[in-house]
Image (cartoon, rainbow, N blue to C red):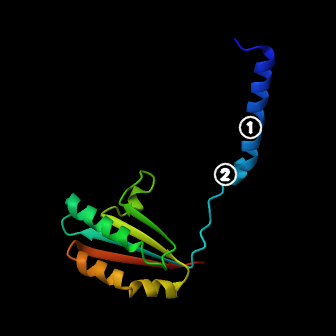
Amino acid sequence: MPTRRQFVQKSTTALAAGAALSSLVTPAEAAKPEVLNYGFIHHVFFWLKNTNNAQDKAQLLQALKDLGKIDVIRAVHFGTATKTKFDEKATDDTYAVSVALFFDNAKDEETYLYHPLHKKFIDANKHLWGKVMVFDSLNA
């Protein structure tokens, strides 16, 4: 059984550690979302020809991940369709896979579009999709 002195020492240490951690992020700071300052976002949505084919979906996702090797891409997000109850009437969840690519500017996105790896991606995978939609966005 710990002595009173050991208990007080451990309690003091725990309180000090807790105070130090709580000073790192205040509740107001934790509530603020990170603002991304990428100059250009290229968001692409793919509808598969064989909508229920897990192998085609996996192949497309892997091929998209391989595009991440292109050096002008600053960040990337790979996703699959989902719908939440709150905004289900406004959500199109009919696509299979999406990729959002983040660039410093429109010139870098153009470099990506003409990059040999991007062209190889299209040639090797275009047989998988029946429809593609692109949404490009400049930083406001």
Residue 119 visible at all: yes
Q: Residue at x 48, y 76 (%)?
A: 73
Q: How many marks?
A: 2
In the rendered view, does 127 fall on the left or right side of 88? left
Give the answer, above or below, for where 33 lies relative to 20: below
Q: Residue at x 80, y 22 (%)?
A: 8
Residue tagged by mark 1?
A: 17
Q: Which image quadrant: the C terminus?
A: bottom right
Q: Amino acid at mark 1?
A: Ala
Residue tagged by mark 2?
A: 30
Query: What kind of element bears circle 1?
Result: helix
Pick whichever of labels 2 and 1 is earlier in the sequence.
1
Residue 35, given in percent of the width and then of the height, sits at: 62, 66
Residue 36, given in percent of the width and then of the height, sits at: 59, 69
Q: CA distance from mark 2 to mark 1?
A: 19 Å
Q: Residue at x 22, y 64 (%)?
A: 56
**Mark 2 in CB contact with mark 1 (< 8 angstroms):** no
Q: Amino acid at mark 2?
A: Ala
Q: Which mark is residue 111?
A: none
Give the answer, above or below, for where 132 lies relative to 19: below
Residue 139, given in percent of the width and then of the height, sits at: 58, 78
Q: Residues within 10 Å of mark 1 (few under 14, many from 20)?
A: few
Residue 49, given in percent of the width and then of the height, sits at: 20, 69
Q: Residue at x 73, y 31 (%)?
A: 14
Query: What kind of element bears circle 2?
Result: helix
Q: Residues within 10 Å of mark 2 (few under 14, many from 20)?
A: few
Give the answer, above or below, for where 133 lies relative to 30: below
